[in-house]
Image: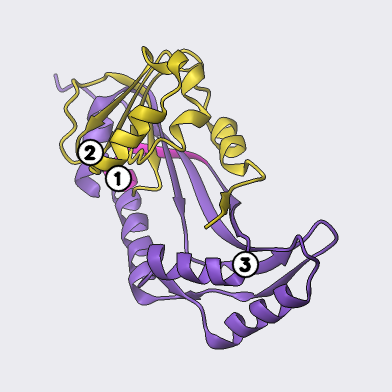
Amino acid sequence: MTIQSDPERNEKKYLHKLADFAQKRVLEIGCGEGRLTWQYAKETRSTVAIDLDADALRVATIDRPSDLESKVHFSLAKSEQLPFSKETFDIAVLAWSL
Amino acid sequence: MVHALSEIRRTLKPNGILIDLRPVLDRWQIEFASTRESRETGRMQDFPVGLADDEAANQSVAHAAQNGWFTREQDDFFSFTYSWDSPKEMEEWIEEEWEGFIGLDEETRQATRSAWALADADARVQVRVKMLITRWKVVAQTSKP
């Protein structure tokens, strides 16, 4: 099956319209295979992307561009119990997950 | 979902930003598109489970706002397009990925198949998903004396 998603790149456009990711510490909730993560992560200081789907996280880790290896980290975690200290992030992104 | 929003708030810095990005059901438009033309062939059907999910999400963010955790700063709608080579591929996707949330009535299914069959060779079938993006700002917690 040949599927294309968002050929107009509206998602990236609106994401950047509402948030400035430059040098920010970002938490993404519901990252799946990282489709959205790749739209902004390069600009961030660091990105932690979480999901409950271990297989999807495996794909995301494999697909992670080499220049993002030190910047983007994937973690198996649920949003109701985030394994992070208080006041860690500048931006949180609920990625199709609320 | 409310507990998740509480957790997110805990991990955000004072004046931190929450971006809520999600699809919302609104009888998404189906169309065929070629380099020469594009035309709507019908609309998806919204099912009660999908509508209930949207309502639950809306109630959660409303609850977070009422509790003084976040303030809404900006929101917008845009379309996120899924595109397939043929109506058959679209129908398979709907059945596999969106089953129970949205559906395709027979009239729209036939209209889409007919329009695609008569269209130019490069025609694809598209669904325009309605997306809501909202920017919320953390409300600083007041320290008790």
Q: Colour of chain B?
A: purple
Can you tell which of label 3 and label 1 is closer to the viewer?
3
Q: Is residue B141 visible?
A: no
Marks 3 and 1, Cα distance to the nearest angstrom? 42 Å
Q: Is residue B67 magenta?
A: yes
Q: Are marks 1 and 2 in contact (CB under 8 Å)?
A: yes
Nearest the eye: B36 or B56 = B36
**SS state under label 2:** helix
Check disc 3: other Cα within 10 Å, few if <14, some if 14-19, many if 20+: many
Q: Are marks 2 and 3 in contact (CB under 8 Å)?
A: no
Residue ID for mark 3 = B86
- In the depicted structure, whether residue A91 falls above or below residue B55: above
Quadrant, the C terminus of chain B: top left
- In the depicted structure, whether residue B20 falls above or below residue A1: above
**SS state under label 1:** helix
| Left-right relation of B23 to A47 | right
The amino acid at mark 2 is: Ser
The amino acid at mark 1 is: Ala
Q: Is residue B91 visible?
A: yes
Residue ID for mark 1 = B64
Marks 1 and 2, Cα distance to the nearest angstrom? 8 Å
Q: Quadrant of residue A87?
A: top left
Marks 2 and 3, Cα distance to the nearest angstrom? 43 Å
- In the depicted structure, whether residue B38 falls above or below residue A83: below
Q: Chain coloured yellow: which letter?
A: A
Looking at marks 1 and 2 on the same chain, the residue that comes earlier in the sequence is marked by 2
Residue ID for mark 2 = B6
Q: Chain of mark 1?
A: B
Give the image location of residue B61, x and y in percent.
Answer: 34, 49
Are discs 3 and 1 both within one chain?
Answer: yes
Magenta highlight range? B64-74
Give the image location of residue B120, x and y in percent.
Answer: 81, 67
